Image: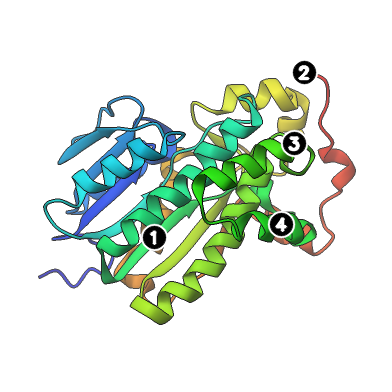
Amino acid sequence: MSDDLTRFDGKRVLVTGAASGMGEATARILGARGAEVYTVDVRKPSVDCAAFYETDLKDPAAIEETVASVTADGPVDRVFNCAGIAQTFPPVDVMLVNFLGMRHLTEALVPHLRDGAAIANISSGAGIGYLANMENVMTLLAITDHAEAKQWCEDHPVEIREGYSFSKECIIVWTMMRGMQLAQDRQIRVNCIAPGPTETGMMPAIVSDMGQDYMDRFPKPLVGRNATAAEQAWPLVLLNSDAMNIVNGTVLYTDQGFAGGLFTGQVDVSLLMPTES
């Protein structure tokens, strides 16, 4: 048995959004590090995997069918929630894919996870304002029924805004909340990353919505460019590895230092106002 705590030999892992971007990069890394990888997406990934499940995260019945299939042969050790869509989609659809569908799938998996399992989610720097929006976030998180939560989103267009930033705020708070709860009950860890601008298939839609000038002005102090999908996948993989067995309920800002600069007043927020594309 390897003494490399970042290997996944003998572990059954589930990766959503594995057909592109950070999900694809995550699945590739996991496969190379010995995991038995099961993938979920609306189209078949190019990565080698034990099984692929074509699943629309907007559809709770499809999610439940996928969970039943992937757990039929045994428990799952690690979950990587990488699926997401941009703010150019209808706001309720964005909420369904990015948060409500992710939550529904994960909660359906929980009874089938091994004790000591780990879950890693992808939030975003767009969710950095969660503290100022806790009332709305906690209101939605308290609605555990999927259909009722969807209805709340439909009834509260102002609160969910464009869908993307609110979904990412919800992921951060849900990660912290469930991390504490599942650790106490089952020693299951839940963490997330909050990436800065990253070159994935979603980036053109973000540029179209926010404007190229906004993206050019966004601080990138470490490498002076957008991150690659693999550069985001590695921290996500590390969070779910045995090397991180006491890390739980945390948000890892994978944004080249932007969050730290913002929190300490070193980022001029006036430079980050969206512009016309």
Say whether residue 227 is visible: no
Residue 23: quadrant of the picture: top left
- Name the residue rendered at 43%, 40% in the picture: 22
Category of crowding for the residue at label 1, using alpha-carbon neighbours closer than 10 angstroms: few (below 14), some (14–19), many (at least 20): many
Closer to us: mark 3 or mark 2?
A: 3
- Of the numbered discs 3 and 4, the one sitting upstream in the chain is 4
From the viewer's perspective, tell me whether residue 161 is left or right of residue 123. Answer: right
**In the image, residue 143 lies at what x, y percent?**
59, 56
Element type at marker 4?
A: helix
Q: From the image, tell me which residue sits under label 1.
A: 119
Picture quarter with the C terminus: top right
Closer to us: mark 3 or mark 1?
A: 3
Q: From the image, tell me which residue sits under label 3.
A: 157
- Of the numbered discs 1 and 2, the one sitting upstream in the chain is 1
Residue 120 against residue 92 in the figure, above or below: below
User: Could you give the CA–CA distance between mark 3 and mark 1, rounded to whole angstroms?
Assistant: 29 Å
- Of the numbered discs 3 and 2, the one sitting upstream in the chain is 3
Closer to us: mark 2 or mark 4?
A: 4
- Name the residue rendered at 71%, 24% in the picture: 209
**In the image, residue 121 lies at what x, y percent?**
46, 53
Which of 181 and 83 lies nearest the eye of the viewer?
181
> Which amino acid does the dot numbered 3 rest on?
Pro
Element type at marker 1?
A: strand
User: Could you give the CA–CA distance between mark 3 and mark 4, rounded to whole angstroms?
Assistant: 17 Å
- Name the residue rendered at 82%, 57% in the picture: 266
Q: From the image, tell me which residue sits under label 4.
A: 130
- Of the numbered discs 3 and 1, the one sitting upstream in the chain is 1
> Which amino acid does the dot numbered 4 rest on?
Tyr
Q: From the image, tell me which residue sits under label 2.
A: 277
> Which amino acid does the dot numbered 2 rest on?
Ser
Closer to us: mark 3 or mark 4?
A: 3
Looking at the rendered structure, which numbered label has been put on residue 79?
none
